[in-house]
Amino acid sequence: MYSASGAPPWLSNGYGHHTAQHAYIPVQTRNPYASSLPPPPTYIPQPLNHTLRTPSAPGTSSPASSDSAKQKVEWPQTVRDYVNRCFAAETQIPGVAREEMEKRLKDVITDAAKRNMLYTYQWDAMLLPQQMIAEERKRAALGLQALPPNFVPPPPPQLPLSYAPGTNPVLPAHSGSETLRKRKSSEMSVDMDNNNQSQPPWRTKKGGSLEDRMSAPDKRQRTEPGPTSSKLNSTLEHRRRRFDLDGRSGSNSPRKHASPPAPAEPLGPVIGRCQKLEKNYFRLTAAPNPDHVRPLDILKQTLDLLKKKWKEQGNYGYICDQFKSMRQDLTVQHIKNEFTTNVYEIHARIALEKGDLGEYNQCQTQLKTLYAQNLGGHPTEFLAYRILYFIYTCNRTGMNDVLSELTQTDRQSKAVKHALAVRSALALGNYHQFFKLYLDPPNMGAYLMDMFIGRERLAALATISKVYKPAIKLRFITEELAFETDAEAAQFIVDHGGQELLKEVKKDGDDFVQMATGNRLFEDAKNAAFSSVDIKGQI
């Protein structure tokens, strides 16, 4: 391959010069380290506990798959008892076919097996398949959301890994945090024993090692008890006996007189079966009884009866009680329609007429929700009442919310226009315009304005007393502040401590009021009237 001199041909004729004969022969790359290094180790996986089934060609079966098919599946005893209860005669439910029950049973057990929870489910507390089917039919009849086809109740908390499947271990009485703290302490003590040969310098200081500091409470417990510890032990023993009702210590011991669990409340709305037209109102303290709840057709007859009795008798106590009972029956049955809106509107008007702002406010709150759902009624009428109510309660936040929600259609309503004009007159201090609006309110707005007319008259008198001095005609006050007679105006001044202002000062046969000394009196009365406002107005 090379020349006689042993050098390659391309180096035989000098540096950088090549001969005419080229002898490029490809050779295999040699690795001088290949022979000295051992081959890489081959990883051999550990055999698995379970035999994996590998797909085989059609018509053939591997020995492993045939052997696994012959093996018998070991089911937990709790699952076997659950299946026996499913097929017991006393657990069968009429109307549930056996085929449906078997299919649901198969779905339940298959789902538990897929989740690997055959040993963790509380099978003795789980619903039977026929019970699940009956519950689904009940929920469908009530219009509720149906259960999933493979519904399984949520599993209980899993037991620690040290407990064997199928056993019923008794948990210790200590809390989980105390057990964890003891476990960590024991682990730290073992680590300290293993490493005590090479302790760092800071472990040899006066404070002692970590083991000594952690075991200090145990050392104190091993000391001989003194008078203080004996007294403490006696106190603890007395406390244990006081709380140990059945003679056994520990917080996990059951009591003899434990109250039975409360029955589950019915799902969905109640369907009333009561046929009485009149029924007193009682606050509910438990689930409503359908035998004491009137259905919708009976409630309509009741409303007609109450309207007739209110016109004939006018007994507000009886009417209010009956309306509250009707509202309760509508609520528990989830009835929200035009009839519901009509009931709340009538009750609100009657409460306004009698000055019961507590009941009116409750009706007003519900009506706002009903109007938002477009369930009929008179929304603009009660919108005007709401504005006047916020004026009475001095609720600026509620007033701003109402003003921000007003539409152009609402502003065109006569009642809403009047309420907004009342608000504007009071905001500007124009008492003359305010009392003109008070004399001509639409609907039942006068009943709400009567709630705050007194304080506005005091505010107007405080303003008048600053300008009209030394005296002013009583007739002027009667006309300006919307009193019906001069006697009513004089009585109003006397009721607020103004007897000295009504001296026998007559000129041309007219009575006068001394305003020179009345400014301070009316200012104090106005401040007292605005300082306390009954928001609810309950009577």
Image (tube, rainbow, N blue to C red):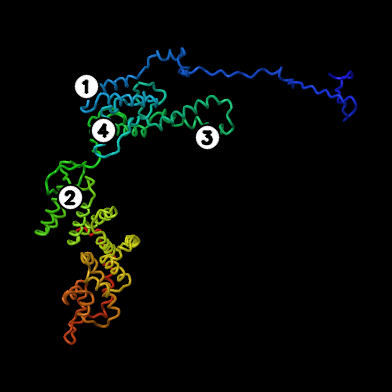
Could you give the CA–CA distance between mark 4 and mark 1, rounded to whole angstroms? 19 Å
| Marks 2, 4: nearer the viewer | 4
Disc 3, SS: loop
Question: Could you say which disc has been placed on residue 368 in the image?
Answer: none
Q: Residues within 10 Å of mark 3 (few under 14, many from 20)?
A: few
Residue 422: image x %, image y %?
28, 69
| Residue in view at x 33 percent, y 72 percent | 428
Give the CA separation, mark 1 to mark 2.
46 Å
**Marks 3 & 2, CB-CB < 8 Å contact:** no
**Spatial distance from mark 4 to mark 3, Cα to Cα?**
66 Å
Q: Which mark is residue 207?
A: 3
Q: Amino acid at mark 2?
A: Met
Name the residue that disc number 2 marks.
Answer: 326
Amino acid at circle 1: Ala
Q: Are marks 4 and 1 in contact (CB under 8 Å)?
A: no
Who comes first in sequence, dot 1 or dot 2? 1
Secondary element type, mark 2: helix
Identified by mark 4, the residue type is Glu
Mark found first going from the N terminus, 3 or 2: 3
- Please determine whether, in this image, residue 375 is positioned above or below residue 42: below
Q: Quadrant of residue 73?
A: top left
Residue located beneath label 1 in the image: 89
> Regarding mark 4 in the picture, which secondary structure is present there?
helix
- Of label 2 and label 4, which has the lower sequence position? 4
What residue appears at the point 13 percent right and 51 percent down from the top-left corner?
302
| x then y, percent, for residue 161 | 42, 24
